[in-house]
């Protein structure tokens, strides 16, 4: 039996990170072995690349290649072996984030994204992607409240994040069977109820 691969996506400030552990706990209660992980990151090398990616200015194509290099390592070391054992993997961001941030936000050519996606995981897509969608002003308000140093992406201007949001929605439109859009502009408890309904069907 192959395990399932679930990813969570959304613009910065969508609040998805707070739902990751809940979802994993819900699945564990059903007796499943669940790995919670994130991108960029998830492996020793990936976490080192994350440090660079979140803090160091770089050329767009360098940024994209490093995202996919971290992803290749993540797939080889953690995701693919876990799924092969029949474990489940819940991952905070995956390739849809590259499509949205480097593609939508920064304007990377779509064909370059598609080539890298095909190379790195042409054989594997998430079984389910939860896209936490919300208006920009609500997301920005949440980020403004965060008491920490903002990373390179969070510091981008509103129009960058608006393009990221639109690219996510476009991607969801193109893959309605895989990507479920969740209205994350609602109060936290309502979002959780929506998530519960989806989780029951998994
Ligand atoms: P994020 O997942 O939001 O972590 P935290 O919740 O700790 O802030 O941070 C990762 C950032 O990396 C986020 O701003 C989006 C960006 N990112 C990309 O630009 N491309 C990618 O392919 C991935 C996976 C992330």
Image: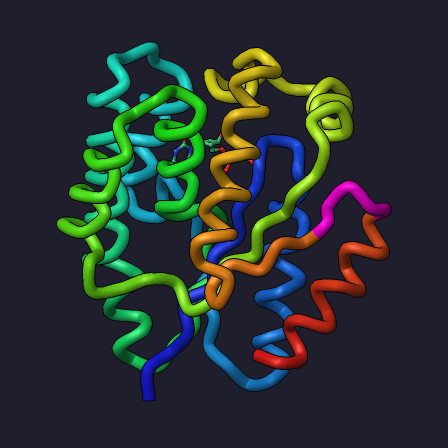
Report x, y in % for residue 63: 27, 24
Between 32 and 61, the one nearer to me in the picture? 61
Bounds of the magenta segment: 183-187
Q: Name the outermost residue toward the left.
A: 119
Report x, y in % for residue 5: 41, 67
Quadrant in which the N terminus appears: bottom left
Report x, y in % for residue 101: 43, 30
Name above or below for residue 127 compared with residue 107.
Answer: below
Horizontal side of 198 relative to 55 (left or right) equals: right
Picture residue at 63% right of the left edge, 47% below the top: 132
Tag count: 0
Picture residue at 18% right of the left edge, 42% below the top: 116
Between 52 and 182, the one nearer to me in the picture? 182
Name above or below for residue 136 compared with residue 196.
Answer: above
User: Visible in this render: residue 146?
Assistant: no
Between 28 and 120, the one nearer to me in the picture? 120
- Corner quadrant of residue 150: top right
Magenta stretch, main secondary structure class:
loop
User: Visible in this render: residue 138?
Assistant: yes
Quadrant in which the C terminus appears: bottom right
- Corner quadrant of residue 140: top right
- Corner quadrant of residue 199: bottom right
Name above or below for residue 138 compared with residue 35.
Answer: above
Report x, y in % for residue 77: 22, 57
> Is 118 one of the magenta-colored residues?
no
């Amino acid at each position: 039996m192959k395990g399932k691969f679930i990813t969570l996506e959304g613009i910065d400030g969508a609040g998805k990170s707070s739902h990751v552990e809940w979802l994993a706990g819900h699945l564990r209660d059903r007796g499943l072995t669940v790995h919670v992980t994130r991108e960029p990151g998830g492996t020793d090398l990936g976490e080192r690349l994350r440090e660079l990616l979140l803090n160091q200015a770089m050329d767009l194509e360098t940024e994209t290649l490093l995202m996919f290099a971290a992803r290749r390592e993540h797939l080889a070391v953690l995701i693919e072996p876990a799924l092969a054992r029949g474990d489940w993997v819940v991952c905070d961001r995956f390739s849809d984030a590259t499509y949205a941030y480097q593609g939508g936000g920064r304007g990377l050519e779509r064909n370059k994204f598609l080539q890298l996606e095909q190379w790195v995981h042409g054989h594997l897509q998430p079984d389910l992607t939860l896209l936490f969608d919300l208006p920009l002003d609500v997301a920005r308000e949440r980020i403004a409240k965060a008491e920490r140093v903002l990373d390179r992406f969070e510091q981008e201007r509103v129009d960058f994040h608006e393009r990221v949001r639109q690219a996510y929605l476009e991607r969801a439109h193109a893959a309605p069977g895989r990507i479920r859009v969740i209205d994350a502009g609602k109060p936290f408890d309502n979002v959780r109820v929506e998530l519960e309904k989806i989780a029951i069907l998994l």
